[in-house]
Amino acid sequence: MESEHRRVLIIGSGPAGYTAAIYTARAGLEPLMLAGLTFGGQLMITTEVENFPGYPDGVTGPAMMEELQKQAERFGTEVLYEDATHVDFSGRPFTVTTDRKVYTADAVIVATGASAKWLGLESEERLLNNGVSACATCDGALFRNKPMAVIGGGDTAMEEALFLTRFATKVTLVHRRGELRASKVMQERALAHEKIEFAWHSEVDEILGDDFATGVRLRDVRDGSTREIPVEAVFVAIGHQPTTGLFEGQLEMDDAAYLKVEAGTTRTTVEGVFACGDVADPTYRQAVTAAGTGCMAAIDAERWLAEHGIE
């Protein structure tokens, strides 16, 4: 298979990857980005972004990704819509393989992101961005003065529910067990909040609505009985899955499969490989924080290359 060498190769094409591309390109490193066949990350399924600085009227996720790509290409980034299928970080130069070619690189920036876990309902997919979301911080304010539901029982679900009380008339927290998995302090805050009600021993049987969510049908896991509650926003908070399968056995991960980086940097456990964005961030998972760590990864890579005499 044909081979091609680059000083910097970026895997992934969300806010982190594009920011890393902009910075490395402006540094004259001529980065190659493997954007993937499903490029642009989670923002490609986000209809309205209102919390990214510089967009006072908001912007759609796809429009933001298009602008970031143009900016990266303006400075010399080459963007290819190919999926990395195999990596070898055991020696330098590093090797990244796609279906079309083998690429070698002096430095690699991993920005493959993470994806929300979903319930797997047809109605959930159909109403995504029309009342169904996996990010309260992103979309909660869009449903001000409306009843809302949060699905889940861990810390993320509690955080989402507590955040949404700023906007919702009521938040119904749906959990399939009779007790929460969240930490004690998060449980106490949620249980004590006057706007949060709990639907125990329940799972979502269907999200109701044709064009927009109008409610949820809940099924009692004990006896199978169902009931409907009116809500205009449903936030699924059952966890995220980092896109790290490609790096198993190559890079060190935590128990949830997020890539480990040295504190305060984007350096992974392999010298010369850097990670940025949601793939290494189980905490914030925002476009703006992803972009910030993309900048960090670019600067870390540029300095590492200079230290090793790779101009």
Image: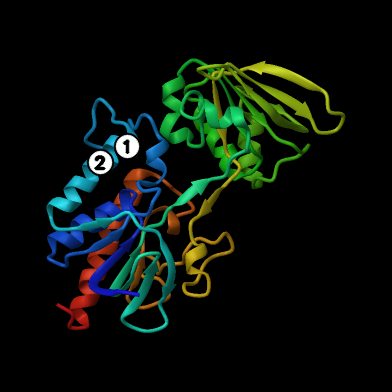
Separation of marks 2 and 1 at Cα, in angstroms: 6 Å
Is residue 266 among what the camera can see?
no
Q: Mark 2 points at which residue?
A: 66
| Residue shown at the point (62%, 38%) measured from the top left | 120
Q: Residue 229, percent across and down? A: 67, 17
User: Most extreme residue toward the front, as rendered?
Assistant: 1
Residue contact between numbered discs 2 and 1, judged by CB atoms under 8 Å: yes
Q: Residue 66, percent across and down? A: 25, 41
Locate residue 144: give its quadrant.
top left
Amino acid type at image mark 1: Pro
Locate residue 91: give its quadrant.
bottom left
Question: Local crowd at mark 1 within 10 Å, few (<14), some, or many (≥20)?
Answer: many
Secondary element under disc 2, as helix, strand or loop, is: helix
Amino acid type at image mark 2: Glu
Q: Residue 100, percent across and down? A: 35, 65
Q: Reply above or below: 17 against 149.
A: below
Secondary element under disc 1, as helix, strand or loop, is: helix
Is residue 162 among what the camera can see?
yes
* 199 or 274: nearer the viewer: 274
Q: Mark 1 points at which residue?
A: 62
Taking the image as shown, residue 200 lies to the left or right of residue 5, namely right
Locate residue 223: give its quadrant.
top right
The N terminus lies in which quarter of the figure? bottom left
Q: Reply above or below: 161 against 146.
A: below
Q: Reply above or below: 97 against 136.
A: below
